[in-house]
Image (cartoon, rainbow, N blue to C red):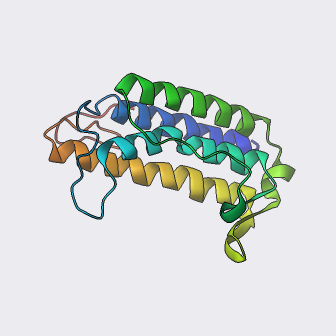
Amino acid sequence: MTISEILLQDFDTEVSNTRRTLERVPEGKNDWKCHDKSMPFGKLAMHCATILMFGHYILEDDGMDMANSKRSQMSFEFTTRDNSLKQLDESSAKCRASLAAASDEHLSKLWKFSYGDKIISHNPRSQSFRQMCFDHLIHHTAQLGVYLRLNDIPVPALYGPSADEQWSA
């Protein structure tokens, strides 16, 4: 089994979990946040919907300098739940295609992530993808689950049962 085939197994699960969570994001609570330092509900939802574009960039670009990025900035403006799901579909399709096409050699090459002269990471592309795409997506999808709970919206069972829903594989 290739590295990309292994990553694709996780990919489909994480996209499904994110979709199930985004499907519950309410409209009209875009600016709600649980703490002054927290991201607003709508912005967090759009961040979850578009994180996979960063995964696509990790797979397609030789590296990324956030201070001088050639990629356009993603919009995190939440308009509707349907739009966030559309953004997830588009970003996941691009990312999945890039991942499916990636060879073990490509995924083993170092990928430099920096902000100007400050190196954030310089690891094999597969590790960068797991940490900055998968782990990042899992973290923020879980955070979105907390936002749902604090707004009395049922939390989906993602890795096991939630207080609101039984889990099935």
- Left or right, 76 with respect to 158, comes to right
Given residues 33 and 68, the one toward you in this image is 68
- Left or right, 48 with respect to 96, comes to left
**Above or below for 59 versus 127:** above
Residue furthest to the right: 105
Label count reads 0
Q: In which quarter of the image is the N terminus?
A: top right
Residue 53 locus on image (x, y percent):
61, 41
Residue 97 locus on image (x, y percent):
71, 31
**Above or below for 136 versus 98:** below
Given residues 56 and 2, the one toward you in this image is 56
Residue drawn at x 65%, y 53% as measured from the top left: 129
Residue 77 locus on image (x, y percent):
42, 39
The image quarter in which residue 160 lies: top left
Residue furthest to the left: 152
Given residues 143 and 14, the one toward you in this image is 143
Residue drawn at x 42%, y 54% as measured from the top left: 139
The image quarter in which residue 9 lies: top right
Q: Quadrant of the C terminus?
A: top left
